[in-house]
């Protein structure tokens, strides 16, 4: 009878993001805490905040490895898609699109979570 050999060594290690930063709830609300009139402006404000956050960690938008985008409907995504693509430059992070029917602030239309790694 032939015996089967089993490999009981430890499983292959999964890659770990060294020096990564994770942020939740990045919005495009104005300085007064209210959403701007324009959806595009709200999207641009949120992306500017992301750039500022990244800069405090010596990172840039191209260092984003995962971007989660919470919106109330698909119209919001299509309106901001070009702005997001421009902000990310050549980066092509994993993206999660999550429908969120309402936010804490009345009139808010989007929110971002992201992970970036050097």
Image (spheres, rainbow, N blue to C red):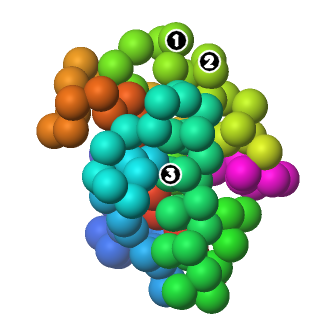
Percent position (x, y) of residue 10? 33, 74
- The part of the image, by quadrant, that contains residue 52 is bottom right
Secondary structure under badge 1? helix
> Mark 1 and mark 2 in contact (Cβ < 8 Å)?
yes
Instruction: Give the magenta-colored segment's residue range.
Output: 87-94
Q: Quadrant of the C terminus?
A: bottom right
Q: How many angstroms separate mark 2 from mark 1 (CA)? A: 5 Å
Relative side of 103 to 51, left or right: left
For label 2, the SS is helix
Q: Residues within 10 Å of mark 1 (few under 14, many from 20)?
A: few
Query: Residue at the spot x=36%, y=65% of the render?
Result: 23
Q: CA distance from mark 2 to mark 3?
A: 16 Å
Q: Main secondary structure of the magenta part?
A: loop
- Taking the spot 54% from the left edge, 51% from the top edge, the residue there is 45
5 vs 66, left or right, is: left
Residue 32: image location, x then y, percent: 32, 55
Q: Is residue 56 left or right of residue 23?
A: right
Q: Is residue 90 above or below residue 17?
A: above
Residue occupied by mark 3 = 46
The residue identified by callout 1 is: 75
């Amino acid at each position: 009878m032939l015996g089967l050999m089993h490999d009981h060594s430890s499983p292959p290690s999964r890659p770990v993001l060294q020096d990564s930063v994770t942020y939740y709830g990045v919005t495009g609300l104005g300085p007064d805490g209210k959403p701007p009139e324009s959806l595009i402006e709200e999207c641009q404000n949120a992306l500017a905040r992301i750039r500022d956050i990244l800069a405090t960690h010596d990172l840039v938008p191209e260092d984003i490895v995962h971007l989660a985008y919470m919106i109330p409907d698909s119209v919001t995504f299509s309106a901001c898609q070009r702005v997001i693509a421009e902000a990310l430059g050549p980066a092509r992070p994993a993206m999660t699109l999550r429908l969120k029917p309402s936010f804490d602030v009345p009139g808010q239309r989007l929110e971002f979570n992201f992970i970036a790694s050097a």
